[in-house]
Image: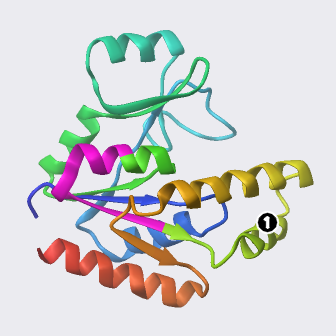
Amino acid sequence: MNNKVIIFSAPSGAGKSTIVNHLLGLRKDLEFSISATSRAPRGTEQHGVEYYFFSADEFRQMIAEDKFVEYEEVYAGSFYGTLKSEVERIWAKGHAIVFDIDVQGGVNLKRIFGEQALSVFIQAPSVDVLRERLVGRGTDTEEAIERRVAKAASEMEFAAGKFDYVLINDDLATAKAEAEGIIDAFLKE
């Protein structure tokens, strides 16, 4: 498989995690990359399962020791990144790495991995559909939804031309099938 990387990025509500989980359930040669963060675990999250959790000081020390492929300080003292050891762990098994990452991180990973990487941007058919999906979740306040919608609009603009493939998720079954085809073709290269 030659150390391949598959990067999925999308605005909140576009269906990225649903599509990624579908692909991971279908293919045993794909493995999800667990990100590192300096934020505290939420709910039942566990170290090494949803994220690798570190303090901000530990994260900074790991940056100084060059332990990350990429990282980002999203807010002051709030870091997210991809550990080199995580990439090496997955490749050692002969698996392709799947990233479910924000848009900026996706662009950074594509730049770092180049031709080894396939970058896929998943988007809802429109900002209005995205808003409807976020409202339908029932998990956010109206203010939070509007913030997410505004961020999604800027992410869609930023992403233009920076991803190998744009997958419009207007029908989930069709989007899943399209994603399967994209991945199959990339892994056969």
Q: Position of residue 2 (x, y in %)?
A: 8, 59
Residue positioned most to the right:
142
In the image, the segment drawn in magenta is 108-121
Quadrant placement of the C terminus: bottom left
Residue 167 versus residue 38 in the image, above or below: below
Q: Is residue 39 left or right of residue 129?
A: left
Residue under label 1, please give it. Answer: 137
Q: Quadrant of the N terminus?
A: bottom left
In-front residue for pair 43/155: 155
The kind of residue tagged 1 is Arg
Query: Quick one: SS at disc 1?
Result: helix
Of the pair 176 and 10, the residue shown nearer to us: 10
Q: Nearer the viewer, residue 16 or 31?
A: 16
Q: How is the image coloured?
A: rainbow
At label 1, counting other C-alpha atoms closer than 10 Å, the crowd grade (few under 14, some 14-19, many 20 or more) is: few
Is residue 66 in view? yes
Secondary structure mostly seen in magenta is helix
Q: Quadrant of residue 62?
A: top left
Residue pictured at 52% horizontal, 16% vertical: 55
Task: Tell me residue 113's x, y (percent).
Answer: 21, 48
Q: Is residue 125 magenta?
A: no
